[in-house]
């Protein structure tokens, strides 16, 4: 995903991008300074880390349908017409995909990469 973001940071800084990044611990959020710089330099880039740690000061828990809907609506996203790219372990991948489909997003608009540790 970082390579896609880096491409847009160089080639098309006006592209609307909303990055929801879910991790268990804040230490797992890599490249934060680079992502914050993208947010400053790209007109329509939003970076929202979601951390499953009660001590985290930002968005807590997991990326759920509620998290997706709220964030997308706050960013005035045209939900069914956006492309969605995500990467993560199978349970997260399945949950996000199911949420997007119940929100009216067609399968061809969902692009995912699964991994497991």
Image (cartoon, rainbow, N blue to C red):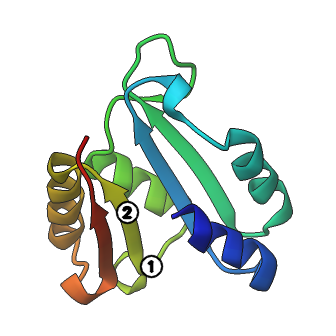
| Residue positioned 45% across, 62% down in the render | 72
Foreground disc of the pair 1, 2: 2
Graded by Cα atoms within 10 Å as few (under 14), some (14 to 19) or many (20 or more), the crowding at tag 1 reads few
Residue 20 x %, y %: 47, 51
Q: How many numbered callouts? A: 2
Measuring from the top left, give residue 34's x and y in whole percent: 75, 50
Circle number at residue 89: none
The residue carrying pointer 2 sits among few (fewer than 14), some (14 to 19) or many (20 or more) residues within 10 Å by Cα, namely some
Q: Which residue is mark 1?
A: 78
The percent coordinates of residue 108 (x first, y second) are: 25, 89
Residue drawn 85% across the image and 62% down it: 41
The vertical placement of 28 against 72, above or below, is above
Query: Residue 35 in the image: x percent, y percent?
Result: 70, 51
- Which quarter of the rendered picture does the C terminus lie within? top left
Residue at x 21%, y 77% (from the top left corner): 104
> If you read the primary sequence from the N terminus, does the residue marked by circle 1 or circle 2 appear first?
1
Residue 102: quarter of image: bottom left
**Label pair 1/2, CB-CB below 8 angstroms:** no
- Residue depicted at x 20% and y 60%: 99
Q: Quadrant of residue 22?
A: top left
Circle 2 is placed at which residue position?
Answer: 86
Q: CA distance from mark 1 to mark 2?
A: 18 Å
Element type where label 1 sits in the image: loop
């Amino acid at each position: 995903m970082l390579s896609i973001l880096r491409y847009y940071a160089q080639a098309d800084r006006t592209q609307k991008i909303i990055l929801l990044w879910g991790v268990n611990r804040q230490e797992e959020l890599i490249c934060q300074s680079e992502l914050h710089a993208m947010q400053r330099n790209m007109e329509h880039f939003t970076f929202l880390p979601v951390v499953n740690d009660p001590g985290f000061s930002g968005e807590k828990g997991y990326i759920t349908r509620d998290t997706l809907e709220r964030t997308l609506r706050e960013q005035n996203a045209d939900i069914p017409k956006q492309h969605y790219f995500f990467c993560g372990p199978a349970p997260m991948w399945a949950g996000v995909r199911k949420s997007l489909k119940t929100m009216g997003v067609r399968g061809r608009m969902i692009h995912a990469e699964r991994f497991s540790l």
